[in-house]
Amino acid sequence: MFNKFVNNYLTNLIKKIIDEQKPKQTDAICEKFLLPEPDRAELLAHSIQRTPKDFVTAFTPPKTAMDSADAVMDSAVNQNCAKFQDKFAISGTVSDIIYTHFATQGFIGFQACAILSQNWLINKACSLPPKEAIATEYNLSYELNNEDEKIDEDFLAKLKKISDATDKFNIKNKCQEFAEKKRQFGQVLAFPVIEGVDYSKPFNIDMVTEGSYKGMSIVDPMWIRPELDGNAVSDPASLNFYEPTYFGMPNGERVHRSWVIFGINGKVPDVLKPTYFFGGYPIPQLIFERVYAAEKVANEAPMLAMSKRLLYMDGNLNTYALDQRKAENDAKAFSYFRDNWGVVVKRPDQNIGQIDTSLTDFDDMMMSQFQLVAAAAGMTAVKLLETQPKGFNSTGEYEEDQNRRLLMTIQKEDFVPLLQLHYRLLAKSKFDKKLHIIVTFDEIDTPDEKERAEINESKSRTLIGYQNAGAIDSQEVRDYLRKDPTSGFDYLDEDVPEVEEETNLFGSDLEEEGNGTTPQNPFSFDEWNESDHPRKKNGQFGTGSGSNVAKSSRSDKIRKRTRKEVQLPKDEYAQVMHELNSNLPKELKNKKVFRRSIGNHTYKVQNNGFNNYKIIGKYEINEMLD
């Protein structure tokens, strides 16, 4: 009886203790999923590493005669800054588990970006698109002051030749470096090196003197310090609000934003701009986790290939426990003979088998990881991995279209601003000309000869249809062909040359009725003369002498048309021929007729091959633009 009482008492006591401990255990488990307040603050500091209080703003209030007004203004500014800093606080309830995942994806720093860029895949994601984008040729033009002026193609060709020279400005290489650094660090600075210029003042082309421009320097972001003036941080309506006004250099020099090209990769919200040093998102930061996961999966492939076979055989566990060393030696011997084409002896009742791990879908799983890398980098997996597109009815057109869009974006946002600034400075420094240079890139996918012929054929049918409908006339068709550089007829003159009237080769008697054939009278009533129409042995008419056949058509006249040659003085002719033989651009060598400015004149030249040029026009040219 006593024992029963004791057992009941102990049982109830234990249940009571368990009931009391349950809530505490539950709370302890839940507390593991919550972050203490110091850790939450640390995560917030990791995401937003800098606030306005970390930056010194040069705010100068207007000078007044009353010192009290200055004190009131300073007080108002301090109050506004204090209220502005409160905007950085996070309000509302955020799940700590979810917030922890995203809070750790903040800015990793320029040094980390440089270290991560050593990886082959990250480096390729940063360097491949700019390399392909700069491979496309570009053309130059400039704004004309009046309609009577014409663009000097020789002057632009000279500018481009100087800029592309690797021993001088090497501007293509600078463009590629600019776009690569922008993707690697999220920001980059293109700094024009000009002697005798005060960079702290806004841009003024008149400051550029003869021979002062030396080229473009691409500056990594760790060497610059963004500085904002009072208007950039206090006036949200400003066009340059919260954007650097000056860039500080290590030597203490301040450079105004109008002198440089500041490239950023993506638009960062204002609240995070100080964290990113007013730059953009680095590609290594966006993809390094995906790259790690993809390479981890790829490294598993050879390990799985070598360990996918599991061999098993019947055994006695009791015997293994009695003599473990002997059992392990037997297993090693069995593995040795199996791997060396040996023979294994087994008992009649012993089963030996092998289990293979299937690798059927492993390739798809591995490729999906690399596709995530490409998506995070803004590229297609076909271009990043240089593989053929897979899938049902996959033609690769979508991938090519996406890659074309990426390259066009790089050309428009990175290359064009840098090239236009470079050529503007070069024209002023070397030729003392104030020109607003316009840069346009050629098509990324240039059609081959067959595709170009098909396109021109389609255009010709369209033009014929419009002409037959009366919408356009032959002169407008000619102007269209002349202005289209891909038509093959861009060498045509603006005015249609007059066709010289030809004499009638058969005399005036042919126009009389019954005396031969003419276009107006195609029938002849002359007496038949068999000797004038020789026959072959089989009785058929031969080719005949053709003396009585008259063919007169516009096409014949055009073929017989000859261009009148302009006679030049001996010295001038020698100078022109020397210039054409020595300095004729490559794009003009394949044209049948072209114009070339030499000295104070522009010559119209018929191209019959090297050292066989015919001068068919000579015009005076205007002076070059100021």
Image: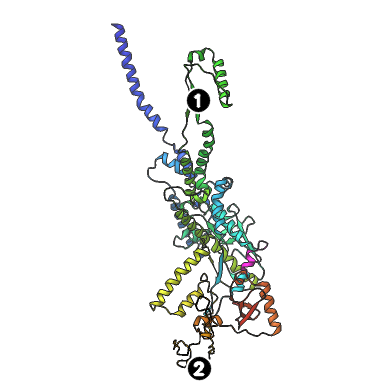
* Front in this rendered view, residue 162 or 560: 560
Q: Main secondary structure of the magenta part?
A: helix
> Range of the magenta residues?
159-168
Which numbered disc, 2 or 1, marks the residue closer to the eye? 2
Q: Nearer the viewer, residue 152 or 337?
A: 337
Viewer-side residue, 578 vs 173: 578
Q: Residue at x 61, y 73 (%)?
A: 155
The image quarter containing residue 149 is bottom right
Which residue is more in the foreground, 250 or 358?
358
Instruction: Name the residue carrying label 1.
Output: 311
Q: Earlier in the sequence, mark 2 or mark 1?
A: 1
Where is 305 relative to 488, above or below?
above
Q: Position of residue 552 (x, y in %)?
A: 50, 84
Residue 40 place in picture, x, y as percent: 45, 40
The residue type indicated by label 2 comes to Asp
How many angstroms separate mark 2 from mark 1 (CA)? 110 Å
Secondary structure category for the residue under label 2: helix
The kind of residue tagged 1 is Leu
Residue on which disc 2 sits? 509
Whether residue 626 is visible, yes or no, is: no
Residue 208 at x, y percent in the picture: 63, 69
Residue at the top extreme, as displayed: 1
Quadrant where the C terminus lies?
Answer: bottom right
- Vertical placement of residue 444 versus 351, above or below: below
In magenta stretch: residue 241 = no
Q: Is residue 332 visible?
A: yes
